[in-house]
Image (cartoon, rainbow, N blue to C red):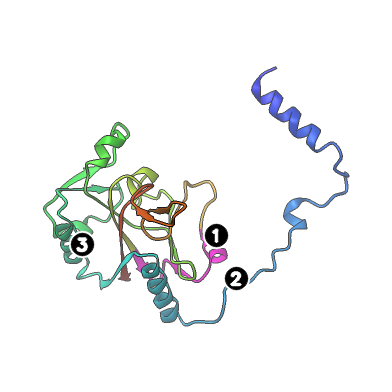
Amino acid sequence: MNSRERILGRVRRALADVPPDERPYAEAVARDYLREHGKRTVEETVDLLAENLADYRAIVHRTGARDLPDLIAGLLAARGSREVLVPPGLPPQWLAATNLERIEDRPGDTPQRLDRVGSVVTGCAVAIAETGTLVLDGSPDQGRRRISLIPDHHICVVRVPAQVVASVPQALERLAPTHPLTWISGPSATSDIELDRVEGVHGPRTLEVILLDD
């Protein structure tokens, strides 16, 4: 008997006393929760996103497409980065104003190599206003999960208002469950039993979010 057969055997034994006419879990659990808490205009939803991002200690910027390259170049220069990690599908015009060496995400790169890169720039799949959360799904402008977790400085560009939703249920409607989803609420942080906050343990120490008027 292999491991798969053992696991399936345990599942069958655990389900042995389930009545055959019991409703499936998907039907038995009520799905009548609110999809949005309160009514807001598009502008108010974006403002709420910016407020909650800042509450999680992300640094929020707002700009239009024309000024985006200069803004990104300025943020990278202020950070003092010598290299910038770039997902394969990042729009090239976003980095048009910087001369930093661009490091592409390659399967052969080790975590130690990526840790030496100062900054990473990505897009996002969706941003949730009520929770101040960014969701990355591995699309070409976001790259693999590890590139948003290893460098110490993450610049994430959110197209406004197209990529902004009010709530988690609305975000889930846009996301494919088969994609590798990374949910980001502020820079990486943890606290010990004394509530001493430490940042940068499980991801970037600094998260900068650019709300791009699209």
Secondary structure, mark 3, is helix
Q: Quadrant of residue 33?
A: bottom right
Residue furthest to the top in view is 1
Type of amino acid under label 2: Arg
What residue is drawn where x is 21% and y is 59%? 93
Q: Residues within 10 Å of mark 3 (few under 14, many from 20)?
A: many
Residue in view at x 19 percent, y 63 percent: 69
Mark 2–mark 1 distance (CA, rounded to whole Å): 11 Å
Identify whether 10 is placed above or below 171. above
Left or right: where does residue 102 sit relative to residue 59? left
- Front residue of 167/208: it is 208
Given the image, on which type of amino acid does mark 1 rest? Leu
Report if residue 167 lies within the magenta region: yes
Residue corresponding to mark 3: 72
- Start-end of magenta stretch: 158-174
Which residue lies under the disc numbered 2?
35
Q: Nearer the viewer, residue 187 or 138?
A: 187
Towards the viewer: 207 or 194: 194
Q: Is 211 placed above or below 17 here?
A: below
Label 1 sits on residue: 172
In the picture, measured across the screen, residue 1 lies left or right of residue 133, that is: right
